[in-house]
Amino acid sequence: MLEDEKQEEISLITGSDCFIDMTNDINIGMWRIHLYDGEQPKMFVNPKMAELLVIDGTNISPEQAYVEWFSRIKDTDVDEVKKYVKAITREGMAEVSYKWIHPVYGEQYIRCGGNSKKIDGKGYVLTGYHRVVFDSVKEEIKNQEKIRRTLQTEVETVQKRQEYRKL
């Protein structure tokens, strides 16, 4: 029964071949999390998500998949991810960026988003995506550094003008 449930959940997030190709090409993993009252969270993942998590998606329980994902969230970002889970269950959809520790590549920036569905008498089912956004975050940091250098140059220019006027 558990294996049937797992396959059904994975097929719900896997979709058509075209969708699979597209998400693989842009390196997006898809997931589904069951947050049922009185039960351990369960995470069902598509093959790309299993690859991103560095787990064997076929030989790992949904409970262990959740632990593998959650336990690698950087300590400083755990509260932010918990806020995201609260927001997604309260508002129906949400997005969060956080740092995650990849077992091979180290710290990565992740963007994660999705939606939720309340299951009466059980809890919630969350469905969403997981994407490494290191390149875009790196570009953002680079742009902020350019702005900082430009502002520093402007400050130095103003200071030199003020010193020149004093002469």
Image (cartoon, rainbow, N blue to C red):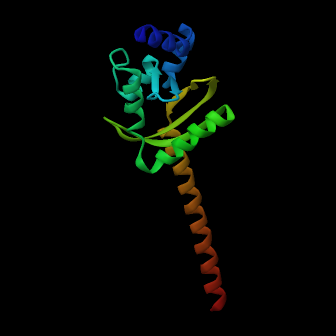
In the image, farthest residue toward the bottom: 167
Residue 35 in the image: state x and y as whole percent: 52, 28
Residue 15 in the image: state x and y as whole percent: 56, 11
Q: In which quadrant of the rendered image does the C terminus lie?
A: bottom right
Front residue of 77/124: it is 124
Front residue of 29/138: it is 29
Relative horizontal placement of residue 21, taking residue 1 as reference (left or right): right
Residue 104 in the image: state x and y as whole percent: 31, 35
Residue ID at (63%, 23%) = 120
Vertical placement of 146 versus 68: above or below? below
Residue ID at (62%, 35%) = 88
Residue ID at (47%, 47%) = 77
Front residue of 132/156: it is 132
Residue ID at (66%, 36%) = 90
Q: Quadrant of residue 151?
A: bottom right
Vertical placement of 30 versus 70: above or below? above
